[in-house]
Image (cartoon, rainbow, N blue to C red):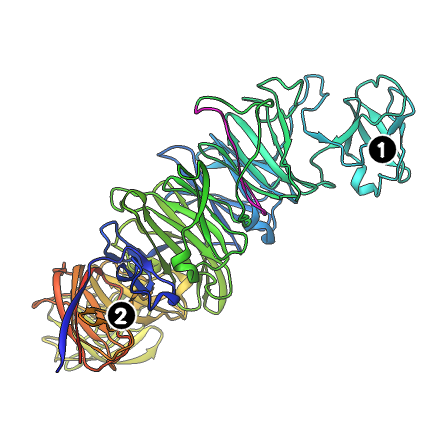
Amino acid sequence: MARTLRTVLSNFSAGELNPLLKTRTDAKAYFNGAQTLRNWYMMDSGGLMRRQGTTYKASLSGESRILPFIFSDDEVAIFVLSNNRLDVFNSAGVSVQSNYTTNCNWTTAQLFELNMAQFGDTVFISHRNNPIVKIKRTSATAFTATLFAFDSHTSGYPRYKPYYKYADSGVTLTAAATTGTTVNITASSAIFDTNANWVNKTIRIGGKEIDIASRTSTTVVVGNIREALANTDATADWDEELISSHRGYPQGISFHDNRLWIGGVKSKPSSVNASQVGDYYNFSVGTGLSNEGIDVAIGGDTVNEIRHIYSGSNLSIFTDGGEYIIPTSSDTSAITPSNIVFRRQTPYGCSRTRPILFDGATLFTQKNGRAVREFIYSDSEAGYAATNISVLASHLIDAPKDIAMVNGSSTRPEQFAIFTNSGSTHNGKLAVFHSIREENIAGWTLWTTRSGDTFHSVTSANENLFTVCKRTLNDVVTYTLEKFAEDDSLSLDCSTTSTLSQRGSPLVKGASQSGLSLIIDGLTTAPQIQEAFTIASVSGTYTITAVTDNGSNTYTISLDGALASSPANNAVITFTKGFLHSVNGIYTNEVINAVYGNSSLGQFTISASDTLTFTVDPQPTGVSVGFNYIPELETMPIDVETDTGPLTGLPRRIVRCIIDVADTLDVSLKSPSTSSAHELVILQSGFTVGSDLTKQNGKKEFYFLGYDKSPTVTVTQNDPLPLKVLGMALEVQFS
């Protein structure tokens, strides 16, 4: 005898779960999670909404990374970094500065290893192989890039840069004179390896600067003594500039406690330096007073390469071998040369992907590229912990190379962390993390775009979420800058709005025409079957049933009815149905979807003329065109508890599914045992294209056939229309 039980899926806040959890009905997340969750926006309420689409803003010069610049609430910019180039767009995605190349020293291969620090109108960009670049806002539409330069005394010397003795401590230098511009400097060991490593570099003897002009041998260089030396004795009291093309440049950079912090110089990877308080270009350690510069290194039995310096409640140092903080004694105290100390907190190691602050914690990608951890203070640990927040969805984390954080807004209250994957499994897909810490809610979903295209970079600035996509358009690989919509009003990717126009200036060609045919000219493109028009001084509206091209923009058209009267020569023809819609040239030869209001107009292949013609009534006046993407929700295998235990592994049938929808116009449901999907398409009587349809709300019923040992329900959508799923109730039948 068959029995039927009901189970309710009240929310999907746990997100997509690792396939290895398919039998873990004992796990708390099981009945709040999904086997597949793609292209959904996870709402704070626990329901799901089709994710927002994107609007096309620009085609870029090549592979690019985007970074935010937030000058104020009212002024936001997006930096687009590509090979030796900077482009700047405003918050609307409009270009304000194009093809700036001065001092843009980053290469394509370095883009996703760059670190950034902003203070007011200035941004610093760092990479271990390049000098620090300083990008300064000079106006809302103008930015300049210069190389970072350390302060110096008013006389020009000394220069307040960090120094370090890379050679063995016992190596001495001897100057042939105490002053002069061509003075031999002799080392006790062969340390001057090549010209390129030493010429134009600065060394210090007894704290006095000498610029190296040439190299004589591995033990002798010729220097320009900038500050008189105390004597010409051999001395081990010497050092060289910490940062140079020979020794490398800082990888990590951040502002904290009114200092600029740098670290991870390639030749001294575990070292951290801080500027003097309030003077971000002065790194002189002086005599160690509290406001002077800081030079300190992480101790330990292994060398930890500093990859990121991050300012939070404490200064966090992320290395390849673990996570550290530089604590202070209280919330009001500052870090000084006398109290600075590194405290190792966790041992996981960080990738080169820049961490972000999200929901009260610092999120970072573990160096193996397979886990995302949140670095946050734990009362129970009396220190910082690095919890793996991706443990239930580890299959979605695939070598993230870019991270963005999206704050809530008036139209989108949810907050997300978004990771751009670069691994072989999910390359170019966005792993999206939704969290409400106070409600103990955390879940992941995956965002994809048109098949064959990928997300390449992502960033947010205030409420603005931008992405760079790698798309193949007209058989050409193109990088596009796109902006996500702030609400659910857009369900297409890389979308634009068409421009409506007539087909030139159509006129009747020749008088005394009658019957079911008409010759017209003055058209810029051929008319189409089913298009409708009127003729000046002739009553009625006529629909085209056939077209013959006579050449020279002249056409003979067949009509659905005889002309009411003979039109005059050159009588004006006005199309009432079938206007041309000009679309963006990037769509040439591409298949796009068109949406007008809440109406899906279908798929179209764009010709070389970059135009569309619609024969619907009334004629659309502004059509959104772009690429469709498919949302997909597949539940975990539906299981219920019986008086004899769970039904895991036993044949059972989902008899009925009651899905609770909100503001929905199209939804499809399918079970594995069902050969085809059940689709609910919401239309109203008297429907006309573009009219405000009544979006459906409430519970909709679907019935399924067939038994399965792991029954699931898949929810998807074929057309780019509004869709929200709040929950499900399922009736499960078993013997």
The N terminus lies in which quarter of the figure?
bottom left
- State which tag comes first along the sequence, 1 or 2: 1
Residue farthest to the left, as pictured: 685
Q: Nearer the viewer, residue 549 or 373?
A: 373
Vertical position of residue 521 compared to residue 366: above or below = below
Q: Position of residue 251 (x, y in %)?
A: 60, 42
Report if residue 324 lies within the magenta region.
yes
Graded by Cα atoms within 10 Å as few (under 14), some (14 to 19) or many (20 or more), the crowding at tag 2 reads: some
Q: Nearer the viewer, residue 163 or 735?
A: 735
Q: Position of residue 417 (x, y in %)?
A: 39, 49
Calculate the distance from the C-alpha at mark 1 to the C-alpha at mark 2.
73 Å
* Residue 735, visible in the rendered structure: yes
Q: Position of residue 632 (x, y in %)?
A: 30, 66
As helix, strand or loop, the secondary structure at mark 2 comes to loop
Question: What's the amino acid at mark 2?
Answer: Asn
Vertical position of residue 284 compared to residue 644: above or below = above
Report if residue 189 lies within the magenta region.
no
- Residue at mark 1: 171
Vertical position of residue 100 compared to residue 575: above or below = above
Q: Nearer the viewer, residue 488 or 356?
A: 356
Q: Nearer the viewer, residue 159 or 355?
A: 355
The residue lying at 91 percent from left, 37 percent from top is 216
Q: Which residues are magenta?
A: 318-331
Occupied quadrant, residue 262? top right
Q: Position of residue 410 (x, y in %)?
A: 25, 42
Question: What's the amino acid at mark 1?
Answer: Val
